């Protein structure tokens, strides 16, 4: 079921958002939206429609015939709208509503529903789904339990085809000597089976778009059957408040936090790593030792995971990333990490030769000692004849290789990865006072974005889209021996402040909720970035023509 709330008001709210970005876009948007709306209800000009009241479209599935579509549209002029629809549609008018469809039986069912509210689709909805559906400016509700029932044979076939595809892939890659692809295929299998199981366990899916003066929000609710496999998975992964994310350095392009059954996830990841050892006698011994360490790591207590990144200069490697893993006791994790790093030289990747230099206690910052790892990778020419992967590694990490610094304060494992990533800056931020201006939680853009996400979540991501695009464009300019156009001074002069797109996901008993929010500042900044890039390209073309 699809609902558009008061089309005239919704269009006005969307127009107000676009006017804040660029007023010249509003007339184009209004015309296109009216056309799309008219065509979606088979009335291109919206003739006879009352656009001050809600509109509904229902899609009905069947095992024996094609999907049927039912329209319930508010009427302003009954004669005009019936004429516009023509003979293709059967229709009934009730209390200033027209109900129409190509399938007469759907109209008859709709008339019965109007006489008995218990037959209404909303009687199937949970209180949470109903509230979300009713509050949205544009809402969609899917009775996925019924959908699964109707398409059960197709879902079973999809599962079989997925297994066959993995088996075929496994046979084809086994022909490559010295390459262990089992962990990668196992990951694909787990993800694929989990997705199919989630569909089979589902009850409903509801999503709602909200338009307000400050931005555009999208909420979704995925509900599953009680005590199903998916429900049990949800319950084993409780959400967290991610307070530590606010202690990361201010001004990062992206902030990310994840929580759940972290013990199982980390153990799975390390088992995955253990399987990447190449298939030699020496590696078999190393693999066994690695697996014994993984077993010991299971005794540690894991919490949430945090990540942020910024982009630096091309000459030093552009990617600088900072991560925190909550682990207790962290001293034990340091011990196990050092043991694992000693074995990493036996690990292989398809078409890649790597050299790992690991230096324990390489640096001291305040009270913390820092371990240093430098990984240099050489890509086989046969696998990468154009040296694309080699160049990409140099762009991301610099000519010295992948540089990673690790510190182990109480209850945490900190990593600063990248040629110019500063562990000192990271430690200073983590240990800073709550009022420090150097940390994210006192950055206005971070505060605004955090309010738009779930208070407690399993995944939280804040992405400064305009600044990220600007930094990437600068990197591309550097790669062509040109100066990057987007300096901090230019961004400030153009009025492009930091602003974060927010995405959050939370799990609870029988449900998964997501929230996405796009602030108007991100739209404004993105449009200005696009305009500057377009203007520069146009100037370059004009200059080129003059020179010719």
Image (cartoon, rainbow, N blue to C red):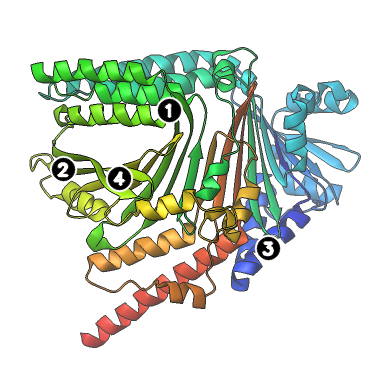
Please tell me which residue is depicted at 77% across the width and 35% down the height of the picture.
131
> Which of pointers 3 and 1 lies earlier in the amino acid sequence?
3
Indicate the position of residue 484 as horizontal and vertical percent values: 33, 71
The residue under label 1 is 329
- Of the numbered discs in the image, which one, if any, rests on residue 427? none
Q: Nearer the viewer, mark 4 or mark 2?
A: 4
Please tell me which residue is depicted at 54% across the width and 14% down the height of the picture.
229
Question: Crowding at label 3, few (<14), some or many (≥20) Cα neighbours within 10 Å?
Answer: some
Against 274, residue 50 (above or below) is below
SS label for mark 4: strand
Query: Label 4, label 1: how many angstroms apart (C-alpha)?
Result: 19 Å
Question: Crowding at label 4, few (<14), some or many (≥20) Cα neighbours within 10 Å?
Answer: many
- Of the numbered discs in the image, which one, if any, rests on residue 15? 3
Query: Label 4, label 3: how many angstroms apart (C-alpha)?
Result: 49 Å
- Of the numbered discs in the image, which one, if any, rests on residue 405? 4
SS label for mark 2: strand
> Which of pointers 4 and 1 lies earlier in the amino acid sequence?
1
Q: Nearer the viewer, mark 2 or mark 1?
A: 1
The residue under label 2 is 377
Query: Label 2, label 3: how many angstroms apart (C-alpha)?
Result: 51 Å
The reply to whether the C-beta atoms of the residues labelled 3 and 1 are less than 8 Å apart is no
């Amino acid at each position: 079921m699809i609902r558009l709330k008061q089309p005239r008001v919704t269009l006005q709210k969307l127009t107000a958002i676009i006017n804040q970005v660029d007023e010249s876009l509003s007339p184009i948007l209004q015309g296109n939206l009216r056309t799309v709306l008219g065509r979606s209800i088979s009335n291109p000009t919206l003739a006879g429609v009352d656009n001050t009241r809600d509109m509904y479209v229902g899609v009905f599935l069947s095992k024996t015939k094609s999907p049927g579509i039912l329209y319930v549209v508010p009427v302003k002029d009954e004669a005009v709208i019936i004429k516009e629809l023509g003979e293709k549609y059967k229709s009934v008018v009730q209390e200033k509503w027209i109900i129409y469809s190509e399938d007469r039986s759907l109209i008859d069912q709709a008339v019965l529903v109007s006489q008995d509210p218990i037959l209404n689709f909303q009687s199937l909805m949970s209180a949470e789904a109903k509230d979300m559906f009713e509050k949205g400016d544009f809402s969609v509700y899917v009775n996925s339990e019924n959908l699964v029932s109707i398409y059960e044979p197709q879902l079973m076939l999809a599962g079989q085809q997925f297994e066959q595809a993995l088996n075929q892939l496994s046979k084809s890659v086994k022909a490559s000597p010295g390459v262990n692809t089992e962990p990668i295929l196992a990951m694909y299998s787990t993800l694929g089976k989990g997705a199919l199981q989630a569909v089979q366990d589902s009850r409903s899916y509801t999503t709602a778009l909200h338009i307000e003066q400050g931005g555009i929000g999208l909420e979704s609710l995925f509900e599953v059957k009680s005590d199903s496999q998916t429900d049990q998975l949800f319950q084993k992964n409780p959400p967290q408040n991610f307070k530590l994310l606010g202690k990361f350095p201010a001004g990062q392009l992206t902030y990310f936090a994840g929580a759940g059954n972290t013990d199982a996830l980390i153990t799975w990841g390390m088992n995955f790593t253990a399987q990447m050892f190449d298939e030699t006698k020496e590696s078999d011994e190393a693999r066994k030792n690695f697996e014994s360490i993984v077993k010991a790591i299971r005794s540690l207590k894991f919490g949430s995971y945090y990540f942020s990144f910024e982009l630096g200069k091309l000459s030093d490697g552009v990617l600088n990333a900072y991560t925190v893993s909550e682990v207790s006791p962290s001293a034990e994790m340091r011990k196990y990490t050092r043991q694992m790093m000693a074995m990493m030289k036996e690990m292989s990747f398809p078409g890649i030769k790597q050299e790992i230099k690991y230096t324990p206690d390489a640096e001291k910052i305040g009270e913390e000692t820092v371990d240093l790892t430098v990984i240099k990778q050489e890509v086989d020419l046969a696998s990468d004849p154009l040296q694309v992967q080699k160049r990409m590694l140099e762009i991301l990490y610099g000519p010295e290789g992948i540089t990673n610094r690790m510190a182990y304060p109480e209850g945490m494992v900190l990593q600063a990865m990248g040629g110019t990533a500063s562990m000192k800056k990271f430690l200073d931020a983590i240990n800073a006072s709550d009022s420090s201006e150097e940390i994210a939680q006192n950055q206005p853009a971070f505060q605004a974005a955090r309010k738009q996400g779930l208070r407690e979540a399993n995944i939280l991501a804040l992405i400064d889209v305009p600044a990220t695009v600007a930094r990437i464009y600068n990197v591309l300019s550097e790669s062509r021996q040109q100066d990057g156009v987007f300096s901090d001074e230019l961004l400030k002069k153009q009025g492009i402040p930091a602003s974060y797109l927010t995405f959050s996901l939370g799990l609870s008993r029988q449900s998964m909720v997501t929230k996405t929010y796009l602030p108007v500042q991100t739209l404004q900044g993105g449009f200005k970035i696009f305009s500057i890039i377009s203007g520069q390209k146009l100037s370059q073309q004009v200059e080129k023509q003059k020179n010719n």
